[in-house]
Amino acid sequence: MRTFRFAHTSLGASASAAAIASPREIERDWAWGDATGHGVRVCVIDSGVDADHPQIGGNVTSYVAEEADGGWGVRPDDGGDVAGHGTACAGVIRSLAPRCELVSVRVLAGNLRGNGDALITALEWAVAQRFPLINVSLSSRKEALKERLHDLADAAFFAGVSLISSAHNSPVVSYPWRFPSVISVGSHDRTDPEYLELNPDPPVDFFACGINVGVAWPGGSTKVVSGNSFATPHVTGLCARILQRHPEFRTPQLRHVLAAVADNLVRSSK
């Protein structure tokens, strides 16, 4: 079963990622080999991160996007993870790229809801900081934010900042995952964390492990979860490994390499 899932809490409709012919083969050994994500900066915009969790392993710099003194800004944060969602995503990234540099920007509250201005502020800051990778396992349905999010996604693309964004789990229109400048991710039910499928039917670009995934949870615990939110950091972790080996790559190259190594390709025998 391959699922194209859209809300972050409910299972959505199924979609089949068909076999796709590959004109030339790019080997995973060339793409990332034994890379660990060493030195690659990854920003996780979410509910915060429990840096003390064994699966996170510390070395996380934490911020919060909040309104204070009459304006929105990104400021140092010691609130940890208020919902668990961010720790889960960060743990997945670290499981694939254990030596990447994680930075957390908290935009969600304990009910996994957030202010649109907080999301815009966090993205503006992260793009300005030139993080090579930004994991956005959330989206907004607010049409009023569409233009600003679109402009930010384009600004990231041209600045060499790759947004890895989860598709909504429900059949609704939301952003930023629908923008072509973003690498968008849905879920499949394979258990292999490196198993990747290329989707021939956009707007979702790739399917990754996102159903019944064991993840880190605040307080040192673990939890089994499902959702595109948790498929997305699998792709982010693989991208961190690619960037360690190929630091000059940007979104188009990352998308091309991920597509070339996808497990559902039919490769030529030549």
Image: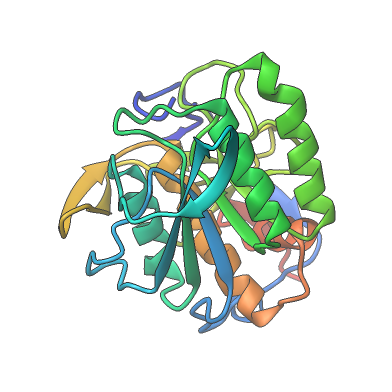
Quick check: 102 above or below 235? below
Farthest residue to the bottom: give it. 34
Which quarter of the rendered picture does the N terminus lie within? top left
Pinpoint residue 247: horizontal percent, then vertical percent: 71, 77
Q: Quadrant of residue 98?
A: bottom left
Quick check: 157 above or below 68? below
Who is closer to the viewer here, 247 or 49? Answer: 49
Q: Residue at x 40, y 27 (%)?
A: 113
Which quarter of the rendered picture does the C terminus lie within? bottom right
Q: How many numbered circles does the render carry?
A: 0
Q: Residue at x 36, y 31 (%)?
A: 112
Who is closer to the viewer here, 48 or 141? Answer: 48
Farthest residue to the front: give it. 69
Tell me if 197 is positioned left or right of 81 in this view: right
Tell me if 224 is positioned left or right of 125 in this view: left
Question: In this view of the protein, can residue 19 be seen by the observer?
Answer: no
Q: Quadrant of residue 53?
A: bottom left
Who is closer to the viewer here, 118 or 235? Answer: 118
Pinpoint residue 70: horizontal percent, then vertical percent: 58, 32
Q: Quadrant of residue 129?
A: bottom right
Q: Residue at x 27, y 41 (%)?
A: 225
Tell me if 133 is positioned left or right of 212 in this view: right
Quick check: 108 above or below 267? above
Pinpoint residue 56: horizontal percent, then vertical percent: 31, 67
Who is closer to the viewer here, 91 or 265? Answer: 91
Question: In this view of the protein, can residue 64 be seen by the observer?
Answer: yes
**Colour treatment of the image:** rainbow
Farthest residue to the right: give it. 158
Q: Residue at x 81, y 57 (%)?
A: 159
Pinpoint residue 30: horizontal percent, then vertical percent: 66, 80
